[in-house]
Amino acid sequence: MSNDVIESLRGKLIVSVQAYPGEPMRHPETMAQVALAAERGGAAAIRCQGLADISAIKGQVDVPVIGLWKEGHDGVYITPTLRHARACIMAGADIVAIDATRRPRPDGLTYTQTVAALKDEGALIMADCGSIDDARMAAEAGSHIISTTLAGYSGEREKTDGPDFELLEQMVAEFPDLPVICEGRVHSPQQARQVMDAGAYAVVVGTAITHPTSITSWFVNAVNK
């Protein structure tokens, strides 16, 4: 079953459905409706944040759910501990996304120890990496998927305007047998096609599809120029 879930993502679009604290759309039912709309548009999986959203979305869609739990704003805050990861799985996540940087984790466990415990429990792990060294650690730890999610956010690489193609290409070249997903600043269908042509196993798009405030601001800025 686990291989089937990962195989279902090959060559496909994953849509990230998240709203930030204080925003009008930050409600589990709203996020579930957005996720269902994305599924109907052809999304092969949904990536979402928070236990309530994971549970609500899992109850609406038939595609796999990649779950995470953000806590805090600095350092490791994407599913920062083993407890957070287990909670995401219990809420219904088919795959759990975890910060896979080499920074200290709040519970004192290493990333490798966290992955080992989760794999013993049958969980599928998506490693959110910020650099090629993170990807190497994540691969060595036995992660099922590695991604470019934290490129430009962990202090090891400059934040690119669009996808971090350089890191993506490094990861694809070094780990040809491991699914490498491109996530982060994919803002157009053209960029999504470019990352697939660069060898990505799948692409995650969030803001450009599911964040109306950002999309509106792009148009406003263009109109006001």
Image (tube, rainbow, N blue to C red):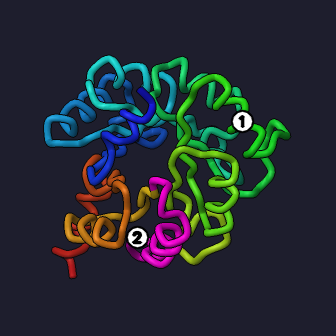
Q: Earlier in the sequence, mark 1 or mark 2?
A: 1
Instruction: Please give the name of the residue rendered at 30% of the width and 27% of the height, measured from the top-left corner.
Output: 32
**What type is the residue that disc 1 sits on?**
Ala
If the image is split into quadrants, where does the C terminus sit? bottom left
Rendered position, 197 above or below 30: below
Instruction: Please give the name of the residue rendered at 66% of the width and 43% of the height, measured from the top-left corner.
Output: 72
Name the residue at the right extreme: 108
Badge 2, how many Cα within 10 Å: few under 14, some, many 20+?
many
In the image, the segment drawn in magenta is 160-179
Q: Residue 160: image x %, image y %?
A: 47, 76
131 and 54: which one is in front? 131
Image mark for residue 124: none
Q: Residue 91: image x %, image y %?
A: 50, 19
**What type is the residue that disc 2 sits on?**
Pro
Snapshot quadrant of residue 30: top left
Is 93 left, or right, of 76 in this rendering?
left
Snapshot quadrant of residue 134: bottom right
Asked if the magenta segment contains residue 173, the reply would be: yes
Q: Which residue is mark 2?
A: 163
Name the residue at the front extreme: 177
Badge 1, how many Cα within 10 Å: few under 14, some, many 20+?
some
Instruction: Please give the name of the residue rendered at 31% of the width and 45% of the height, measured from the top-left corner.
Output: 15
Snapshot quadrant of residue 114: top right
Image mark for residue 116: 1
If the image is split into quadrants, where does the N terminus sit? top left
Q: Nearer the viewer, mark 1 or mark 2?
A: 1
Instruction: Look at the numbered disc 2 and give the secondary structure of its residue.
Output: loop
